[in-house]
Image (cartoon, grey):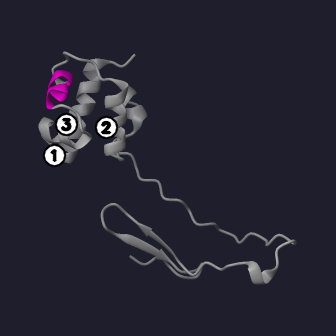
Amino acid sequence: MVNTEAFIQRLEKILDYYQLTASAFADRINVQRSSISHLLTGRNKPSLEFVLKVVKSFPEVNLYWLLNGKGRFPQEKQVAALPKEEKAIPSNTSVDSVKEIEKIIFFYTDGSFRIYKDKSDKPSH
């Protein structure tokens, strides 16, 4: 069971982090403004639908942290690591049919990006 008082504190921390009013927060996660007001005053408990909308709308919010207070907020963004070594081509695959990767580009939500061209290149920003 979720501790409602602690949940409210974590919800307020999210509002502060994103510098949102309760109304703007409600609009962003597409719930009625009165729902946020009722949650913040302790009148209502958060529904599963509400919690999932928060986590979906704010990727830095970790579900486990929001529900239980364990973990970190904001959570660190996970970036997939590039393979450290090349894999052998299966013997039943002809060399001509293997396509080579020219470059990989990661686009981040803040508008920045990182390009990887090959193992010897350092990432560019």
Question: Which residue type carries mark 2?
Answer: Val
Q: Disc 2 or 1, which lies upstream in sequence?
A: 1
Which residue does the image show at 15% across and 43% down from the upper left?
A: 20
Q: Vertical placement of 98 versus 18: above or below? A: below
Question: Which residue type carries mark 3?
Answer: Ala
Find residue 29 and report its horizontal and vertical position in percent: 26, 40
Crowding near the residue tagged with mark 1, few <14, some 14–19, many ≥20 C-alpha atoms within 10 Å: few
Marks 3/1: CA–CA distance? 13 Å
On the rendered structure, is 18 left or right of 78?
left
**Quick one: SS at disc 2?**
helix
Q: Vertical placement of 89 versus 58: above or below? A: below
Marks 2/3: CA–CA distance? 10 Å
**In front: mark 2 or mark 1?**
2
On the rendered structure, is 101 left or right of 39?
right
**Quick one: SS at disc 3?**
helix
Question: Which residue type carries mark 1?
Answer: Gln
Residue 120 image-quadrant placement: bottom right
**Which region of the structure is painted magenta?**
33-39
Crowding near the residue tagged with mark 3, few <14, some 14–19, many ≥20 C-alpha atoms within 10 Å: some
Residue 19 is labelled as 1
Residue 8 image-quadrant placement: top left
Residue at which label 2 appears: 54
Which residue does the image show at 14% across and 26% down from the upper left?
A: 34
From the image, which quarter does the C terminus lie in? bottom left
Q: Disc 3 or 1, which lies upstream in sequence?
A: 1
**Quick one: SS at disc 1?**
loop
Residue 26 is labelled as 3
On the rendered structure, is 92 left or right of 25?
right
Marks 2/1: CA–CA distance? 15 Å
Magenta segment, principal secondary structure?
A: helix
Which residue does the image show at 25% across and 32% down from the upper left?
A: 11
